[in-house]
Amino acid sequence: MGGNTFGRLLRLTTYGESHGPAIGGVLEGFPAGVEIDFSLVDRDMARRRPGQSSLTTPRSEEDRVEFLSGIFEGRSLGTPIAFLIRNKDSRSKDYDALKDVYRPSHADFTWEQKYGHRDYRGGGRSSARETAARVAAGALAKMLLAKAGVEVMAWVSAVGPFEAQVNQDTVNPEQIASNPLRCPDPAAAGRMIEYIEQLKEAGDSTGGVITGLIRGVPAGLGEPVFDKLQAGLGKAMLSINAVKGFDYGSGFSAAAMKGSEHNDAFSTGPNGEVITLTNRSGGIQGGISNGQPIYFRVAFKPVATIAKAQQTINKQGEAVTLEAKGRHDPCVVPRAVPIVEAMAALTLADHFLRNKVASL
């Protein structure tokens, strides 16, 4: 099975299945001498952890990261950083009846067609449980970026038909963390939470949108032609479970604009630095960062596993009425915020290191 490694110079390989003994990863290319803030790792893991509110799956995992190598006396060694996260609350019996059933909009059918043998317990490696390893590695990438003054954050900007109004110039992590939805617009968050709880009661689910914001990015990150910075971010986000769309800057709305409306005019800032008067480019021009904040949006589909009865078939082609059991999120976006941050941080950190060797 390929496709388990992400990045060029900063490379993350993840391993493990949802109901196996553990999941984890190996992070290569991380520079030596970086002070490791284990509390940041714990905080980000807690933000992704299941069972944290009524809006998430009741599966209860401690998600404690055990570092096995690459760190000594609180600092990185420059050698591969290996870590594992033990699975302690998997209930495989919930999936016994699904062994031969193809769940609608899941990976069951496609994985079986490709590999001929799959772990049906909780989706195996296709489960979003794998993303816990990404969050652990992403926390390390954030520490590397922080040394360069780069800050990565994300928040829930839409759930179902409800959208938040957020000022990207002033939003901060404290505002994002002010409610379990991780939406910095309190009024919109209240409507979103009520909507999710209504759907949960009805045995249904909903999707949503997460907005990512990266401040302090230096100009010059990105590797044209095929490794443009936005291409790297797009790949990173589209690799996350349940993601159906990605755009950055003005995104699809740019298609309806005139050039005179969309162009970001250059000027000089208070310290003589080059700035743009607007930021419809989303901080990236020609595939390379221009020094302005990078912002993007990630669309998540509704959770595929729902309590409502659904029609499907089994491996024998027989019609089956599926009434899902197990423990599942009615909406993934609250827990997906740190996953989006992690993948953005890994992408930026990789390009940051690649930029170091771009010229003499």
Image: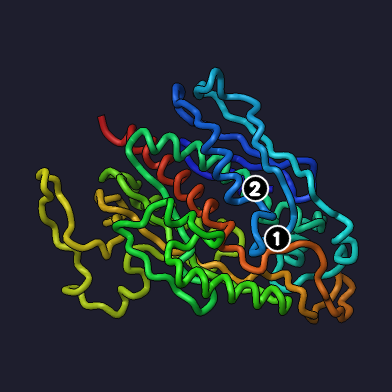
What percent of the width, then of the height, locates residue 72? 56, 19
What percent of the width, then of the height, locates residue 16? 72, 44
Q: In which image quadrant can residue 265 be found?
A: bottom left
Residue type indicated by callout 2: Gly
What percent of the width, then of the height, locates residue 111? 74, 60
Q: Is residue 290 visible?
A: yes
- Front-lying residue, 64 or 100: 64
Indicate the secondary structure of the residue bearing disc 2: loop
Task: Tell me the residue that label 1 is attached to.
Answer: 57
Q: Residue at x 11, y 47 (%)?
A: 270
Q: Residue at x 13, y 57 (%)?
A: 266
Nearer to us: label 2 or label 1: 1
Q: Residue at x 89, y 73 (%)?
A: 316
- Front-lying residue, 264 or 313: 264
Mark 2 → mark 1, Cα distance in angstroms: 29 Å
Task: Tell me the residue that label 2 is attached to.
Answer: 2
Q: In which image quadrant can residue 165 be found?
A: bottom left
